[in-house]
Amino acid sequence: MTTLYQEQQALLHLQLTVLRWLRDGLRHSAERLHWPITASDLDDPEAAERLAALNDRFTKLQDQLAGAMRHAHTMLGERYRSYFDVVTWMTHEGIITAPEVWLELRTLRNQLTHDYDWEAQTAAQYLNAVHDNMGTLMAIFKRFEEVCNKYGLLPAVEGSE
């Protein structure tokens, strides 16, 4: 194995470590809230802070996951013309069941990060949608880790030989 490939493996390993931190933080934030969120919850400073953390972790987890998937796709020598090539690969590998699954999550992420003029009721709806989609996002991450292991994209664990 070349040093360059080992560097790519180490980078992917680091990306997965960051993803685990974000996943665990997202779970922690969600567990500290009462669901479903209502518009009045947004007036509570403690709840608002937790919701901001939840929103931040959900969007960062998705952004970092997208980058790690692109990296893994490239490590396999796959041709990359657009991110849809990665989404197609994700579907083929069973990481997602259909492209629409990922596109729906991205749409939610984009709504959360780019719409600042929400009414409280709309904000509560988006935040409840985050909670409703957390399981899907975490399952995608789990299947992605499995695919990385399947193809040997991660560095060998010392002492496992």
Image (spheres, rainbow, N blue to C red):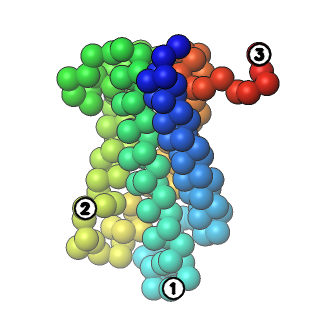
Whether tag 3 and tag 1 are in contact, CB under 8 A, the answer is: no
Name the residue located 60 percent from the left edge and 26 percent from the top edge: 155
The answer to whether one can see residue 2 in this image is yes
The 10 Å Cα crowd at callout 2, few under 14, some 14 to 19, many 20 or more, is few
The numbered mark, 2 or 1, whose residue comes first in the sequence reads 1
The CA span between labels 3 and 1 is: 54 Å
The quadrant holding residue 27 is: bottom right
Front-lying residue, 13 or 94: 13
Name the residue tied to disc 2: 114
The CA span between labels 2 and 1 is: 23 Å
Tell me residue 73's x, y (percent).
Answer: 39, 23
Q: What element carries label 3?
A: loop
Which of discs 3 and 2 lies nearer the camera? The answer is 3
The CA span between labels 3 and 2 is: 48 Å
- Count every numbered label the image shows and give the total: 3
Q: Is mark 2 on a helix, strand or loop?
A: helix
The 10 Å Cα crowd at callout 3, few under 14, some 14 to 19, many 20 or more, is few
- Considering only vertical position in the picture, is 52 above or below 99? below
Outermost residue, left direction?
Answer: 81
Image-based side of 12 in relation to 28, left or right:
left
Front-lying residue, 123 or 26: 26
Front-lying residue, 104 or 125: 104
Name the residue located 77 percent from the left edge and 16 percent from the top edge: 161
- Considering only vertical position in the picture, is 128 above or below 64? below
Tell me residue 123's x, y (percent).
Answer: 36, 68
Amino acid type shown at disc 2: His
The answer to whether one can see residue 135 in this image is no
The quadrant holding residue 138 is: top right
Q: Residue 44 carries which label?
A: 1
The numbered mark, 3 or 1, whose residue comes first in the sequence reads 1
The 10 Å Cα crowd at callout 1, few under 14, some 14 to 19, many 20 or more, is few
Q: Residue 161 carries which label?
A: 3
